[in-house]
Amino acid sequence: MFKSALLAMGLAAAALPAAAGPNDILIGLDQKVTYGPDGAVNGAPGKDEILIMDIANPAKPTIRARLPLMNSLLGPPTNLHITPDGKLGLVANSVVNTPDANGYKVSPDDRLFVIDLTAQPPKLVDTVAVGKQPSGMAISKKGDLVLIANRNGKSVSVLSIVNGKVTAIGDVAFEQEAAAVAITPDGKRAFVCLNLANRIAVLNIDGQKVTYDKTMDIPVAFNPYNVDVTPNGKFVLAATTGAGKNNGDAMVVIEAGGPHPHVVDIMTPGTAPEGFAISPDGKWVVAALLLGTGAKQSDWFKTKTGEVVLMSLDSATGELNIRHRAKAGGLPEGVAFSPKSDYVYVGNYFDSDLQVFKISGERLNQVGPNMKLGGQPASMRALAR
């Protein structure tokens, strides 16, 4: 009715503002870190942004809002998320840059930004204190619980969401860094990457009570840095990035159920699968391989471009099989799927752009030219499902 009235007045339907919902993805642009011949160089803060991107037309995403909020490359590409109802965007800022005698010093931050995605335009509505150097984030399927892995804090922060209000309610302590976290669809367990200990920790969840039993730690490959749970809740996938020097890194498959979760498979898609995503329908896993794009110019394995790997996921066994590889840009970080699992979005940090791929058969086919973002994409997440 409202749309018809606008058209009657001669206003195009395209002029209607985009609304929050299942078609949003968040992209964090970190403008503080540049790369020279000797690797990363940290500069002045102040130019970071969070993009809210509308993928209602999955082949032609559009930016519906830009918010000047700090966020960081120095942490896994999962430090932000959207609640299952599409109403809130959460962004954890891992570090801050402050001046020192050598330019700028990197220090842990402890802020979680809460964005109202229903506002026109979306806006920051709250800032919540969490643990030090918050990195990977997970939101329960019910949308009432948030867990944030804190690297410097060696903890997981526990937060509640009630009537759109995000509140910190406690922390689960570890003896090691925590880099990423994922919650099972039934909301009864979470899995945490203890990256320096080369283990995955298991958390038990009872409502908003979260506890840790160290005896359930799962040994995995070197430096587990990112983690997610399959939509059917049967398996946990962890990406490890510690092999180094252009050696193949592992994707580890963990059986999530039963009294003793354990590793059931290990495979390697290639070097440095730091960012990965599981499709909403559970059929696919896409990993963005850094390859040698973050290496120094003098390193023998230095490359200009990364790679995107499409893997099939067996829902019964958790087995991953490589189906196709496609060229990515420099330092590909964030990965996200469209709601129908048929499109994939990959952010290239060095190139400040976004690639859109359509899954056709068992292939990744790029759709259109790379989309310039106006900044360096360090992280990307779609709606929590």
Image (cartoon, rainbow, N blue to C red):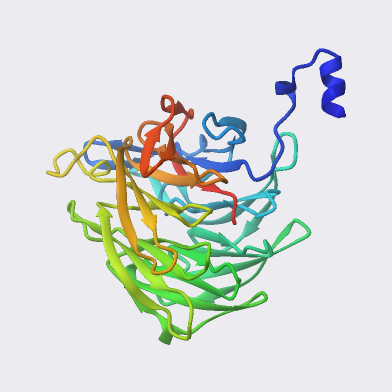
Rendered location of residue 213, percent (x, y)? 48, 84
- Residue 147, how many percent across, how many down? 57, 65
Name the quadrant of the C terminus.
Answer: bottom right
Q: Nearer the viewer, residue 253 or 273?
A: 253
Quarter in which the N terminus is drawn: top right
- Residue 54 place in picture, x, y as percent: 61, 35
Quadrant for residue 217, please give it: bottom left
Q: Nearer the viewer, residue 236 or 332?
A: 236
Left or right, residue 353 beside residue 223: right
Is 295 placed left or right of 289 in the picture? left
- How many numbered marks appear? 0
Counting from the top left corner in percent of width and height, residue 188 is at 59, 76
**Residue drawn at (55%, 47%) of the image:** 382
Relative to 216, say whether 27 is above or below: above
Task: Say whether residue 32 is visible.
Answer: no
The residue sitting at the top extreme is 10
The residue under the point 22% across, 36% down is: 37
Q: In the displayed image of the protein, which residue is found farthest to the front?
A: 361
Query: Is residue 88 toward the left or the right of residue 378 in the image?
Result: right
Kindly tell me whether residue 12 is visible in this rendering.
Answer: yes
The residue that appears at 53% across and 66% down in the rendered structure is 232
- Identify whether 169 is placed above or below 299: below
